[in-house]
């Protein structure tokens, strides 16, 4: 087959790779290899995974081609440095991502075409409810989702505290702040500031350990609620980290209007979001936009779309600071 067609075939068949990784993580193969010192026979891996040896070896050899494993001797497999990224507890929580992508997310993507025809969100069509409602009814999947989000935040937002001057704000409200990892890192860089961690009650209820370990629990209030109803008032800076991309323009504007009403007159808004462009964005950016369409009905936005969205909610975009190819700091002020 000519090379261009072969490269295209690899893209078309990319699901083969993701499903192979999902199977290995789901069966605990990666963690078993880690506990065995990184190397183990296929027969032992099959025994511990309670599956048949021959088909498992075929999956493992596919992972060798993906550079996640090596096969130094026939049917004996060894984790590579890349493969170790999939072990439980590894930075980035890629094991959690693999499990999500192999399960609910994959089934939603399989419904992309019907969703394009009806205008409904694919996840909603497949599961009969929205993603966040689904997670509320399934605590185990919610923990997996939280693990994935926390892992993502660990490397996407590491630059935020150093890239923006938080020292001049008295009260910083993190809207949809999850378990508080980002807010904790911000408060460590702004020792005079007070923080308000705002998210659903069941989420902020488990944020105490993160805040205590960062040494900021005494300066941070945890508030449970729904940002479509209201957000805590009196803040000088409202931070929204990867919140707006979950929602369509109507609902994103509603969240922003609630922030606008809640903040002090001299307040500021800081968004941590991807910003699409027509030239220099990474390949993953446009696919991430499709992922939001598929899972939540949300979207990634261009600078012009952020300007228009912010204006409708009572803000003016004041600055954009790229942090890395997938993340920007977007500052806005009230109009």
Image (cartoon, rainbow, N blue to C red):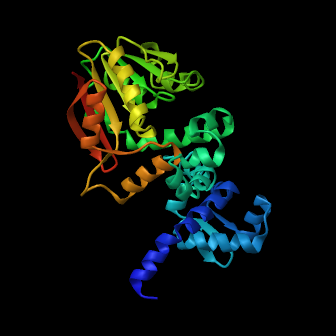
Q: Which quadrant of the figure contains the C terminus?
A: top left
Q: Residue furthest front?
A: 118
329 vs 69, nearest the viewer: 329
Q: Position of residue 263 (x, y in %)?
A: 32, 15
User: Is 186 rendered above or below residue 306?
Assistant: above
Give 258 or 92, whichever is nearer the viewer.
258
Q: Quick check: 188 left or right of 85?
A: left
Is residue 317 visible to the viewer in this orientation of the structure? Answer: yes
| Extreme-bottom residue of the structure | 1
Q: How many marks?
A: 0
Q: Is residue 45 above or below residue 333?
A: below
The residue nearer to you, when weighing 32 against 308, is: 308
Q: Residue furthest left?
A: 318
Residue 245 occupies quadrant? top left
The x, y position of residue 154, in whole percent, is 44, 40
Asked if one can make out residue 193 in the rendered structure from this viewpoint, the answer is no
In x, y percent, where is residue 206? 58, 25
Q: Quadrant of residue 163?
A: top left
- Residue appearing at x 58%, y 39% in the figure: 130
User: In the drawing, does residue 138 fall left or right of residue 81?
Assistant: right
Give the answer, above or below, for where 257 lies relative to 36.
above
Q: Residue at x 68, y 38 (%)?
A: 140
Question: Residue 45's x, y, as percent?
Answer: 73, 64
| Residue that appears at 50% across and 48% down | 119
**Is 165 in front, or is 331?**
331
Residue 87, relative to residue 135: is it above or below? below
């Amino acid at each position: 087959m000519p090379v261009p067609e072969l490269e295209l075939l690899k893209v078309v068949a990319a699901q083969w790779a993701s499903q192979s990784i999902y199977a290995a993580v789901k069966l605990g193969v990666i963690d078993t290899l880690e506990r065995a010192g990184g190397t183990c026979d296929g027969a032992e891996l099959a025994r511990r995974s309670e599956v048949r040896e021959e088909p498992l070896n075929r999956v493992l050899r596919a992972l060798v081609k993906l550079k996640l494993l090596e096969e130094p001797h026939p049917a004996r497999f060894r984790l590579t440095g890349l493969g170790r990224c999939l072990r439980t507890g590894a930075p980035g929580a890629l094991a959690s991502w693999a499990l999500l992508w192999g399960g609910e997310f994959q089934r939603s993507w399989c419904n992309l075409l019907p969703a394009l025809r009806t205008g409904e969100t694919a996840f909603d069509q497949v599961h009969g409810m929205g993603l966040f409602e689904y997670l509320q009814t399934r605590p185990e999947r919610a923990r997996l989702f939280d693990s994935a989000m926390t892992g993502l935040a660990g490397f996407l937002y590491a630059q935020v505290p150093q890239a923006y001057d938080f020292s001049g704000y008295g009260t910083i409200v993190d809207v949809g702040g999850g378990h508080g990892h980002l807010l904790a890192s911000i408060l460590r860089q702004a020792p005079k500031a007070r923080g308000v961690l705002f998210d659903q009650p069941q989420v902020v209820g488990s944020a105490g350990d993160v805040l205590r370990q960062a040494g900021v629990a005494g300066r941070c209030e945890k508030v449970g609620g729904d940002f479509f109803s209201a957000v805590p008032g009196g803040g000088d800076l409202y931070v929204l980290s990867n919140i707006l991309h979950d929602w369509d323009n109507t609902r994103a504007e509603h969240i922003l209007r609630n922030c606008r009403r809640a903040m002090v007159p001299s307040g500021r808004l800081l968004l941590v979001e991807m910003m699409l462009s027509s030239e220099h964005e990474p390949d993953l950016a446009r696919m991430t936009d499709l992922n939001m369409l598929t899972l939540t009905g949300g979207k990634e936005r261009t600078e012009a779309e952020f300007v228009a969205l912010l204006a409708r909610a009572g803000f003016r975009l004041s600055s954009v600071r790229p942090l890395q190819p997938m993340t920007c700091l977007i500052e806005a002020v009230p109009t």
